[in-house]
Amino acid sequence: MSSPLSVILTQNKLTGENFNDWKRNLLIVLNFEKHSFVLTQPRPPTPAIDARDRDFVALERWDNSNLSAMCYIRASMSNVLQKQHEEHQTARQIMDNLEEMFGEQTIQAKTDAIKGLMNCRQKVGTPIK
């Protein structure tokens, strides 16, 4: 990992239960490196032989950014998760799969936190500040 910010990812590898923190750190690095667009934009179609140079440049930029993003993602996860995501061809495929695996935990944690807050009661006789 070439970026000084990439230290964040090496120190906070994805293990599963830390998915939200890991994802936030990953997006910081990908945004800084200008690779995050591959998570939201599909790969441009392969240009025809007689296409404009900028079409080839756009495709090459996307492919290079996708490769970099996949490397950042895979390098910042546990060996078990790396093995599970070897066959994915895009960074978005990896992230979508990780969302399926660990995103439900996030929803459950939020639900539990809201339930806990809703059930909090102030002790009788305690002044409101």
Image (cartoon, grey):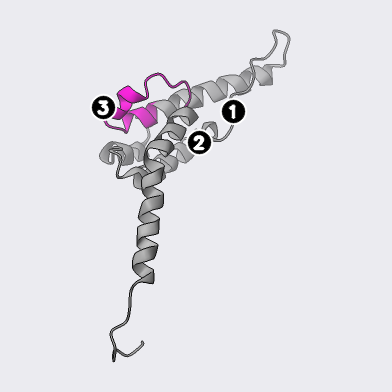
For the point 43% across and 32% down, the residue is 97
Distance of mark 2 from mark 3, alpha carbons?
23 Å
Amino acid type, label 1: Pro
The answer to which of 108 and 58 lies nearer the viewer is 108
- Disc assigned to residue 36: 2
111, above or below 10, in the image? below
Occupied quadrant, residue 60: top right
The answer to which of 122 and 24 lies nearer the viewer is 122
Which residues are drawn in magenta? 71-90
As helix, strand or loop, the secondary structure at mark 2 comes to helix
Dot 3 or dot 1: first in sequence order is: 1
Location of the N terminus by quadrant is top left
> Badge 3, how many Cα within 10 Å: few under 14, some, many 20+?
few
As helix, strand or loop, the secondary structure at mark 1 comes to loop
82, above or below 101, in the image? above
Dot 2 or dot 3: first in sequence order is: 2
94, above or below 86, in the image? below
For the point 47% across and 20% down, the residue is 89
For the point 44% across and 41% down, the residue is 27
The answer to which of 58 and 44 lies nearer the viewer is 44
Name the residue tied to disc 3: 79
Amino acid type, label 3: Asn
Name the residue tied to disc 1: 42
Q: Does residue 115 show up magenta in the picture?
A: no
Distance of mark 3 from mark 1, alpha carbons?
27 Å
Amino acid type, label 2: Ser
